[in-house]
Amino acid sequence: MRLLTCALVTVLAVPVSVAQATQQTSSRTLDGSQNNVEHPDWGQANTPYPRVAAPRYLDSRASPVPGPPVRYISNRIFNDTSQNLFSENAVTQWGAVWGQFLDHTFGLRQVGGGESAPMAFDPADPLEAFRNDLGTLAFQRTPAAPGTGATSPREQVNTVSGYIDASAVYGDSADRLQWLRESGDQGPRARLLLPGGYLPRVDARGDAAAAPPMELFGRLAADPSKAMVAGDARANENMPLTATHTLFALEHNRIVGALPQSLPEEEKFQIARRLVGAEQQFITYHEFLPALGVTLPRYRGYDPQVNAAITNEFAVVGYRAHSMIHGEFEPSVPPATFTNAQLDAFAAQGVEIKKVAGSVVLVVPLNLSLGNPELLRKIGIGPVLRGIGAEPEYKNDEQIDNQLRSVLFQVPKPGTTDPAKCLDGPPLPTCFSGVVDLAATDIERGRDHGMP
Protein backbone atom coordinates (compact mmCIF):
# COMPACT_ATOMS: atom_id res chain seq x y z
CA MET A 1 0.00 0.00 0.00
CA ARG A 2 1.30 3.41 -0.89
CA LEU A 3 1.80 5.56 2.18
CA LEU A 4 1.84 9.31 1.96
CA THR A 5 3.90 9.15 5.16
CA CYS A 6 7.02 8.05 3.23
CA ALA A 7 8.08 11.58 2.31
CA LEU A 8 6.94 12.90 5.69
CA VAL A 9 9.14 10.46 7.60
CA THR A 10 12.06 11.06 5.23
CA VAL A 11 11.93 14.84 5.46
CA LEU A 12 11.42 15.04 9.22
CA ALA A 13 14.40 12.73 9.76
CA VAL A 14 16.85 14.93 7.79
CA PRO A 15 19.38 16.61 10.13
CA VAL A 16 19.28 20.39 10.16
CA SER A 17 22.16 21.91 8.18
CA VAL A 18 22.86 25.18 9.94
CA ALA A 19 25.09 26.42 7.13
CA GLN A 20 22.32 25.95 4.57
CA ALA A 21 19.54 27.20 6.80
CA THR A 22 21.32 30.43 7.67
CA GLN A 23 22.40 31.38 4.17
CA GLN A 24 19.38 33.67 3.92
CA THR A 25 18.14 35.19 7.17
CA SER A 26 15.45 37.51 5.81
CA SER A 27 11.98 36.17 6.57
CA ARG A 28 8.92 36.05 4.37
CA THR A 29 5.91 38.08 5.45
CA LEU A 30 3.12 36.37 7.36
CA ASP A 31 0.31 37.59 5.13
CA GLY A 32 1.93 36.69 1.79
CA SER A 33 2.57 40.29 0.73
CA GLN A 34 5.89 41.12 -0.98
CA ASN A 35 6.40 37.50 -2.05
CA ASN A 36 6.30 38.80 -5.60
CA VAL A 37 8.16 42.11 -5.52
CA GLU A 38 6.73 43.17 -8.89
CA HIS A 39 3.17 42.46 -7.71
CA PRO A 40 3.38 42.73 -3.91
CA ASP A 41 -0.32 42.09 -3.25
CA TRP A 42 -0.60 38.89 -5.32
CA GLY A 43 -1.42 36.04 -2.97
CA GLN A 44 -1.78 38.40 -0.02
CA ALA A 45 -4.27 37.58 2.73
CA ASN A 46 -7.54 39.54 2.82
CA THR A 47 -7.68 40.18 -0.92
CA PRO A 48 -10.35 38.93 -3.37
CA TYR A 49 -9.87 35.59 -5.10
CA PRO A 50 -8.92 36.18 -8.75
CA ARG A 51 -11.07 34.42 -11.36
CA VAL A 52 -10.29 32.41 -14.47
CA ALA A 53 -13.68 33.06 -16.08
CA ALA A 54 -16.33 35.72 -15.66
CA PRO A 55 -18.76 35.12 -12.79
CA ARG A 56 -22.29 33.90 -13.53
CA TYR A 57 -25.05 35.48 -11.46
CA LEU A 58 -28.76 35.59 -12.24
CA ASP A 59 -28.78 39.39 -12.24
CA SER A 60 -25.15 39.66 -13.44
CA ARG A 61 -24.21 41.10 -10.04
CA ALA A 62 -24.96 38.96 -6.98
CA SER A 63 -28.04 36.70 -7.11
CA PRO A 64 -27.21 32.97 -7.38
CA VAL A 65 -28.46 31.16 -10.47
CA PRO A 66 -31.23 28.77 -9.29
CA GLY A 67 -31.17 25.05 -9.92
CA PRO A 68 -32.53 21.77 -8.61
CA PRO A 69 -32.63 21.48 -4.79
CA VAL A 70 -29.10 20.64 -3.68
CA ARG A 71 -30.15 18.01 -1.12
CA TYR A 72 -32.12 16.29 -3.88
CA ILE A 73 -28.96 16.19 -6.02
CA SER A 74 -26.87 15.00 -3.07
CA ASN A 75 -29.23 12.09 -2.35
CA ARG A 76 -29.13 10.87 -5.94
CA ILE A 77 -25.59 11.62 -7.09
CA PHE A 78 -23.35 11.73 -4.01
CA ASN A 79 -25.07 9.13 -1.82
CA ASP A 80 -22.55 6.31 -1.33
CA THR A 81 -25.27 3.91 -0.03
CA SER A 82 -22.87 2.82 2.74
CA GLN A 83 -20.28 1.45 0.32
CA ASN A 84 -16.56 1.45 1.06
CA LEU A 85 -14.95 2.57 -2.21
CA PHE A 86 -11.27 2.85 -1.37
CA SER A 87 -8.49 4.60 -3.30
CA GLU A 88 -7.75 2.83 -6.57
CA ASN A 89 -4.14 3.96 -6.16
CA ALA A 90 -3.82 2.62 -2.58
CA VAL A 91 -3.24 6.10 -1.17
CA THR A 92 -3.68 6.12 2.60
CA GLN A 93 -5.83 8.53 4.57
CA TRP A 94 -2.82 10.84 4.57
CA GLY A 95 -3.99 11.89 1.11
CA ALA A 96 -7.22 13.42 2.45
CA VAL A 97 -5.66 14.65 5.70
CA TRP A 98 -2.75 16.34 3.92
CA GLY A 99 -5.15 17.81 1.40
CA GLN A 100 -7.10 19.47 4.20
CA PHE A 101 -3.97 20.65 6.02
CA LEU A 102 -2.79 22.16 2.75
CA ASP A 103 -6.18 23.70 2.02
CA HIS A 104 -6.14 25.34 5.44
CA THR A 105 -2.74 26.80 4.59
CA PHE A 106 -3.77 28.75 1.49
CA GLY A 107 -7.54 29.21 1.54
CA LEU A 108 -10.15 30.55 3.98
CA ARG A 109 -13.06 32.55 2.63
CA GLN A 110 -14.39 35.43 4.68
CA VAL A 111 -17.39 34.15 6.63
CA GLY A 112 -18.73 36.90 8.87
CA GLY A 113 -21.64 38.99 7.64
CA GLY A 114 -22.98 36.84 4.81
CA GLU A 115 -26.72 36.51 4.28
CA SER A 116 -28.55 33.44 5.61
CA ALA A 117 -29.84 31.34 2.71
CA PRO A 118 -31.15 27.99 4.09
CA MET A 119 -31.19 25.00 1.74
CA ALA A 120 -34.41 23.04 1.26
CA PHE A 121 -34.96 19.68 2.97
CA ASP A 122 -37.82 17.39 1.90
CA PRO A 123 -38.65 14.82 4.62
CA ALA A 124 -40.96 13.02 2.16
CA ASP A 125 -38.10 12.29 -0.25
CA PRO A 126 -37.90 8.47 -0.44
CA LEU A 127 -34.09 8.66 -0.14
CA GLU A 128 -34.21 10.56 3.16
CA ALA A 129 -33.03 8.39 6.04
CA PHE A 130 -32.13 11.09 8.57
CA ARG A 131 -34.31 13.07 10.92
CA ASN A 132 -34.39 16.84 10.50
CA ASP A 133 -36.60 18.80 12.90
CA LEU A 134 -35.29 22.12 11.60
CA GLY A 135 -36.92 21.85 8.16
CA THR A 136 -33.95 23.22 6.24
CA LEU A 137 -30.18 22.82 5.97
CA ALA A 138 -28.29 25.83 7.25
CA PHE A 139 -26.30 27.85 4.70
CA GLN A 140 -24.75 31.28 4.90
CA ARG A 141 -23.54 33.13 1.85
CA THR A 142 -19.96 34.38 1.64
CA PRO A 143 -20.06 38.16 2.14
CA ALA A 144 -19.26 40.34 -0.85
CA ALA A 145 -15.78 41.79 -1.14
CA PRO A 146 -15.81 45.55 -0.50
CA GLY A 147 -17.06 47.52 -3.49
CA THR A 148 -18.57 44.50 -5.28
CA GLY A 149 -22.05 43.04 -5.68
CA ALA A 150 -23.95 46.28 -6.24
CA THR A 151 -22.80 47.82 -9.50
CA SER A 152 -20.19 45.17 -10.30
CA PRO A 153 -20.23 41.34 -9.97
CA ARG A 154 -19.94 40.02 -6.45
CA GLU A 155 -16.46 38.81 -5.48
CA GLN A 156 -15.23 36.98 -2.37
CA VAL A 157 -12.20 37.47 -0.10
CA ASN A 158 -9.51 34.94 0.79
CA THR A 159 -8.51 35.77 4.37
CA VAL A 160 -5.22 33.82 4.36
CA SER A 161 -2.09 33.88 2.22
CA GLY A 162 -2.37 31.96 -1.04
CA TYR A 163 1.14 30.52 -0.75
CA ILE A 164 2.33 27.17 0.62
CA ASP A 165 4.10 28.83 3.54
CA ALA A 166 3.06 26.78 6.61
CA SER A 167 0.69 29.55 7.68
CA ALA A 168 -1.53 26.84 9.21
CA VAL A 169 1.29 26.44 11.75
CA TYR A 170 2.22 30.09 12.27
CA GLY A 171 -0.84 32.13 11.28
CA ASP A 172 -1.17 35.10 8.96
CA SER A 173 -0.89 37.87 11.57
CA ALA A 174 1.72 39.02 14.07
CA ASP A 175 -0.75 38.93 16.98
CA ARG A 176 -1.63 35.26 16.45
CA LEU A 177 2.01 34.28 16.02
CA GLN A 178 3.11 36.13 19.15
CA TRP A 179 0.48 34.24 21.19
CA LEU A 180 1.69 30.92 19.75
CA ARG A 181 5.34 31.46 20.67
CA GLU A 182 6.84 30.79 24.09
CA SER A 183 7.46 33.97 26.06
CA GLY A 184 10.73 35.03 27.67
CA ASP A 185 12.11 37.96 29.59
CA GLN A 186 13.54 39.43 26.40
CA GLY A 187 10.46 38.81 24.25
CA PRO A 188 9.15 35.88 22.21
CA ARG A 189 11.31 32.76 22.19
CA ALA A 190 12.14 30.63 19.18
CA ARG A 191 10.01 27.70 20.34
CA LEU A 192 6.26 27.38 19.89
CA LEU A 193 4.09 26.95 22.97
CA LEU A 194 3.31 23.22 23.27
CA PRO A 195 2.41 22.31 26.86
CA GLY A 196 2.79 18.57 27.35
CA GLY A 197 3.61 18.12 23.67
CA TYR A 198 0.17 19.26 22.46
CA LEU A 199 -1.22 22.46 21.00
CA PRO A 200 -2.07 24.99 23.71
CA ARG A 201 -5.68 25.43 24.82
CA VAL A 202 -7.25 28.87 24.65
CA ASP A 203 -6.65 29.31 28.39
CA ALA A 204 -2.94 28.36 28.22
CA ARG A 205 -1.94 31.97 28.98
CA GLY A 206 -4.63 32.51 31.62
CA ASP A 207 -7.21 34.65 29.82
CA ALA A 208 -9.09 32.52 27.29
CA ALA A 209 -10.81 35.61 25.89
CA ALA A 210 -7.43 37.01 24.83
CA ALA A 211 -6.51 33.92 22.80
CA PRO A 212 -6.63 34.07 19.00
CA PRO A 213 -10.12 33.16 17.74
CA MET A 214 -10.70 29.51 16.83
CA GLU A 215 -13.71 28.08 15.02
CA LEU A 216 -15.84 25.97 17.34
CA PHE A 217 -17.03 22.67 15.89
CA GLY A 218 -19.23 20.01 17.48
CA ARG A 219 -18.58 19.61 21.21
CA LEU A 220 -16.50 22.77 21.34
CA ALA A 221 -19.63 24.83 20.75
CA ALA A 222 -20.74 23.77 24.23
CA ASP A 223 -17.27 23.88 25.82
CA PRO A 224 -15.08 26.41 23.99
CA SER A 225 -12.45 26.34 26.77
CA LYS A 226 -11.23 22.98 25.39
CA ALA A 227 -10.34 24.47 21.99
CA MET A 228 -6.70 24.18 20.95
CA VAL A 229 -4.96 27.15 19.30
CA ALA A 230 -2.94 26.93 16.09
CA GLY A 231 -1.97 29.08 13.15
CA ASP A 232 -5.27 28.34 11.40
CA ALA A 233 -8.64 28.87 13.09
CA ARG A 234 -10.00 25.50 11.84
CA ALA A 235 -7.39 23.32 13.58
CA ASN A 236 -9.99 21.68 15.85
CA GLU A 237 -12.18 20.52 12.98
CA ASN A 238 -11.24 16.86 13.32
CA MET A 239 -8.74 14.73 15.22
CA PRO A 240 -6.34 13.85 12.33
CA LEU A 241 -6.16 17.51 11.31
CA THR A 242 -5.41 18.58 14.89
CA ALA A 243 -2.76 15.86 15.10
CA THR A 244 -1.11 17.11 11.89
CA HIS A 245 -1.05 20.68 13.22
CA THR A 246 0.56 19.35 16.38
CA LEU A 247 3.14 17.31 14.42
CA PHE A 248 4.44 20.34 12.55
CA ALA A 249 4.50 22.53 15.64
CA LEU A 250 6.59 19.79 17.29
CA GLU A 251 8.79 19.68 14.20
CA HIS A 252 9.40 23.43 14.52
CA ASN A 253 10.58 22.94 18.10
CA ARG A 254 12.73 19.97 17.08
CA ILE A 255 14.57 22.14 14.56
CA VAL A 256 15.01 24.92 17.11
CA GLY A 257 16.54 22.41 19.51
CA ALA A 258 19.04 21.29 16.86
CA LEU A 259 20.33 24.81 16.20
CA PRO A 260 23.27 26.40 18.04
CA GLN A 261 21.93 27.94 21.24
CA SER A 262 24.22 30.92 20.67
CA LEU A 263 21.97 32.16 17.85
CA PRO A 264 19.47 34.90 18.73
CA GLU A 265 15.95 33.65 19.48
CA GLU A 266 14.42 35.42 16.48
CA GLU A 267 17.01 33.99 14.11
CA LYS A 268 16.41 30.46 15.40
CA PHE A 269 12.66 30.97 15.03
CA GLN A 270 12.91 32.19 11.44
CA ILE A 271 15.28 29.35 10.42
CA ALA A 272 12.85 26.78 11.83
CA ARG A 273 9.88 28.50 10.20
CA ARG A 274 11.65 28.53 6.83
CA LEU A 275 12.49 24.82 7.09
CA VAL A 276 8.96 23.82 8.15
CA GLY A 277 7.55 25.76 5.18
CA ALA A 278 10.05 24.00 2.89
CA GLU A 279 9.02 20.62 4.30
CA GLN A 280 5.38 21.37 3.56
CA GLN A 281 6.29 22.34 0.00
CA PHE A 282 8.48 19.25 -0.47
CA ILE A 283 5.79 16.84 0.71
CA THR A 284 3.17 18.59 -1.44
CA TYR A 285 5.14 18.53 -4.69
CA HIS A 286 7.06 15.27 -4.29
CA GLU A 287 4.44 13.06 -2.62
CA PHE A 288 0.93 14.52 -2.39
CA LEU A 289 0.43 15.74 -5.96
CA PRO A 290 2.00 12.63 -7.57
CA ALA A 291 -0.26 10.48 -5.36
CA LEU A 292 -3.24 12.31 -6.86
CA GLY A 293 -1.92 11.70 -10.38
CA VAL A 294 -0.86 15.32 -10.88
CA THR A 295 2.36 15.67 -12.89
CA LEU A 296 3.84 19.14 -13.12
CA PRO A 297 6.55 20.35 -15.52
CA ARG A 298 10.03 20.81 -14.10
CA TYR A 299 10.47 24.01 -12.10
CA ARG A 300 12.39 26.58 -14.12
CA GLY A 301 12.64 29.48 -11.73
CA TYR A 302 10.43 32.18 -10.26
CA ASP A 303 8.16 33.87 -12.80
CA PRO A 304 6.89 37.21 -11.46
CA GLN A 305 4.20 37.33 -14.15
CA VAL A 306 2.37 34.31 -12.68
CA ASN A 307 -0.21 35.20 -10.04
CA ALA A 308 0.17 32.44 -7.44
CA ALA A 309 -3.03 33.44 -5.60
CA ILE A 310 -5.60 30.64 -5.63
CA THR A 311 -8.53 31.39 -7.90
CA ASN A 312 -12.20 31.40 -7.00
CA GLU A 313 -12.75 28.40 -9.27
CA PHE A 314 -9.96 26.44 -7.58
CA ALA A 315 -11.17 27.23 -4.06
CA VAL A 316 -14.85 26.48 -4.74
CA VAL A 317 -14.72 23.67 -7.33
CA GLY A 318 -11.27 22.40 -8.27
CA TYR A 319 -10.02 21.57 -4.78
CA ARG A 320 -13.18 20.06 -3.27
CA ALA A 321 -11.96 16.46 -2.94
CA HIS A 322 -14.41 15.62 -0.17
CA SER A 323 -15.12 12.23 -1.73
CA MET A 324 -11.64 11.06 -0.61
CA ILE A 325 -12.56 11.33 3.07
CA HIS A 326 -13.35 8.07 4.85
CA GLY A 327 -15.90 8.55 7.63
CA GLU A 328 -13.80 6.91 10.34
CA PHE A 329 -10.24 6.66 11.66
CA GLU A 330 -8.65 3.56 13.18
CA PRO A 331 -5.75 4.18 15.57
CA SER A 332 -4.14 0.90 16.63
CA VAL A 333 -2.26 0.37 19.90
CA PRO A 334 -0.63 -2.55 21.79
CA PRO A 335 -3.08 -4.37 24.09
CA ALA A 336 -1.66 -2.91 27.34
CA THR A 337 -1.82 0.73 26.21
CA PHE A 338 -5.20 1.46 27.81
CA THR A 339 -6.92 0.06 30.87
CA ASN A 340 -10.31 -1.60 30.60
CA ALA A 341 -11.80 1.49 32.23
CA GLN A 342 -10.27 3.71 29.56
CA LEU A 343 -11.54 1.44 26.79
CA ASP A 344 -15.01 1.47 28.36
CA ALA A 345 -14.88 5.28 28.44
CA PHE A 346 -13.95 5.37 24.74
CA ALA A 347 -16.82 2.99 23.94
CA ALA A 348 -19.25 5.16 25.92
CA GLN A 349 -18.35 8.09 23.66
CA GLY A 350 -19.05 6.09 20.50
CA VAL A 351 -15.63 4.57 19.73
CA GLU A 352 -15.84 0.97 18.53
CA ILE A 353 -13.23 -1.23 20.21
CA LYS A 354 -11.79 -4.06 18.11
CA LYS A 355 -9.30 -6.55 19.50
CA VAL A 356 -7.23 -8.17 16.77
CA ALA A 357 -4.04 -10.21 16.89
CA GLY A 358 -1.54 -8.32 19.01
CA SER A 359 -3.33 -4.96 19.03
CA VAL A 360 -6.40 -2.98 19.98
CA VAL A 361 -8.04 -0.92 17.23
CA LEU A 362 -10.08 2.17 18.13
CA VAL A 363 -12.61 2.86 15.36
CA VAL A 364 -13.41 6.57 15.68
CA PRO A 365 -16.31 7.86 13.53
CA LEU A 366 -15.72 11.23 11.93
CA ASN A 367 -18.60 12.94 13.73
CA LEU A 368 -17.11 11.94 17.10
CA SER A 369 -13.79 13.40 15.98
CA LEU A 370 -15.45 16.71 15.05
CA GLY A 371 -14.42 19.46 17.44
CA ASN A 372 -13.08 16.98 19.97
CA PRO A 373 -9.39 17.75 20.62
CA GLU A 374 -9.64 16.10 24.04
CA LEU A 375 -10.03 12.76 22.29
CA LEU A 376 -6.64 13.31 20.63
CA ARG A 377 -5.06 13.85 24.04
CA LYS A 378 -6.65 10.68 25.41
CA ILE A 379 -5.68 8.44 22.48
CA GLY A 380 -2.28 10.06 21.85
CA ILE A 381 -0.78 11.75 18.82
CA GLY A 382 1.40 8.75 17.88
CA PRO A 383 -1.43 6.22 17.48
CA VAL A 384 -3.54 8.76 15.59
CA LEU A 385 -0.78 9.64 13.10
CA ARG A 386 0.10 5.99 12.55
CA GLY A 387 -3.59 5.16 12.11
CA ILE A 388 -3.89 7.74 9.32
CA GLY A 389 -1.19 5.93 7.38
CA ALA A 390 -2.50 2.43 8.06
CA GLU A 391 -5.77 2.58 6.12
CA PRO A 392 -6.60 3.69 2.57
CA GLU A 393 -8.56 6.83 1.86
CA TYR A 394 -11.71 6.72 -0.23
CA LYS A 395 -11.65 6.80 -4.00
CA ASN A 396 -11.70 10.23 -5.62
CA ASP A 397 -15.09 9.96 -7.31
CA GLU A 398 -18.52 11.57 -7.01
CA GLN A 399 -19.62 9.59 -3.94
CA ILE A 400 -19.29 11.09 -0.47
CA ASP A 401 -19.35 9.25 2.85
CA ASN A 402 -22.57 9.76 4.79
CA GLN A 403 -20.51 10.95 7.75
CA LEU A 404 -19.99 14.07 5.63
CA ARG A 405 -23.24 14.01 3.68
CA SER A 406 -25.85 13.28 6.34
CA VAL A 407 -24.30 13.51 9.78
CA LEU A 408 -26.91 14.17 12.45
CA PHE A 409 -26.30 17.07 14.76
CA GLN A 410 -28.28 18.33 17.71
CA VAL A 411 -28.98 21.89 18.84
CA PRO A 412 -30.79 23.00 22.01
CA LYS A 413 -34.42 24.02 21.95
CA PRO A 414 -35.13 27.52 23.29
CA GLY A 415 -34.79 27.50 27.06
CA THR A 416 -32.43 24.51 27.24
CA THR A 417 -29.87 25.25 29.93
CA ASP A 418 -27.36 22.52 29.14
CA PRO A 419 -26.43 22.58 25.44
CA ALA A 420 -23.74 19.95 26.04
CA LYS A 421 -26.51 17.36 26.34
CA CYS A 422 -27.29 17.92 22.69
CA LEU A 423 -23.81 16.86 21.62
CA ASP A 424 -23.66 13.30 22.91
CA GLY A 425 -25.63 10.21 22.05
CA PRO A 426 -28.94 10.02 20.17
CA PRO A 427 -31.26 13.02 19.82
CA LEU A 428 -32.65 13.97 23.21
CA PRO A 429 -36.10 15.44 24.03
CA THR A 430 -34.52 18.83 24.77
CA CYS A 431 -32.89 19.08 21.35
CA PHE A 432 -33.64 19.57 17.66
CA SER A 433 -32.01 17.26 15.13
CA GLY A 434 -30.67 18.38 11.79
CA VAL A 435 -28.51 17.27 8.88
CA VAL A 436 -25.14 18.58 7.72
CA ASP A 437 -24.63 17.81 4.03
CA LEU A 438 -21.21 18.76 2.69
CA ALA A 439 -22.07 17.68 -0.86
CA ALA A 440 -25.14 19.94 -0.91
CA THR A 441 -23.11 22.75 0.63
CA ASP A 442 -20.43 22.38 -2.05
CA ILE A 443 -23.03 22.74 -4.81
CA GLU A 444 -24.69 25.71 -3.14
CA ARG A 445 -21.32 27.38 -2.55
CA GLY A 446 -20.67 27.20 -6.29
CA ARG A 447 -23.94 29.03 -6.95
CA ASP A 448 -23.17 31.49 -4.14
CA HIS A 449 -19.79 32.38 -5.74
CA GLY A 450 -21.21 32.69 -9.24
CA MET A 451 -19.39 29.71 -10.73
CA PRO A 452 -19.87 29.51 -14.53
Image (tube, rainbow, N blue to C red):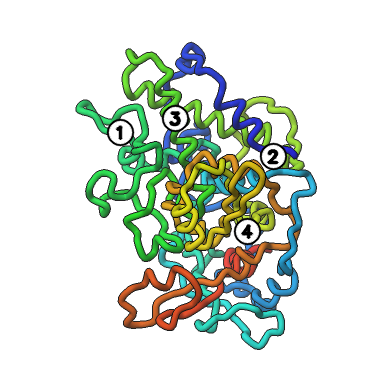
Q: Which mark is residue 327?
A: 4
- Picture layout, residue 237 above or below residue 129: above
Q: Residues within 10 Å of mark 4 (few under 14, many from 20)?
A: many
Measure the C-alpha gap from mark 4 to mark 1. 36 Å
In this picture, residue 161 sits left or right of residue 223: right
**Which is nearer the N-term, disc 4 or disc 1?**
1
Viewer-proximal residue among 66 and 277: 277
Residue under numbered circle 3: 252
Question: Mark number for residue 182?
Answer: 1
Task: Give the CA separation, mark 2 to mark 3.
Answer: 24 Å
Instruction: Specify the amino acid type for callout 4.
Output: Gly
Q: Which percent across, then down, holds residue 176?
A: 35, 43
Q: Give left or right: position of 105 versus 266.
A: right
Instruction: Name the N-terminal-most of marks 3 and 1.
Output: 1
Q: Is residue 116 above or below residue 366?
A: below
Determine the residue positioned at 64% across, 30% down: 7
- State the image quarter where residue 407 is shown: bottom right
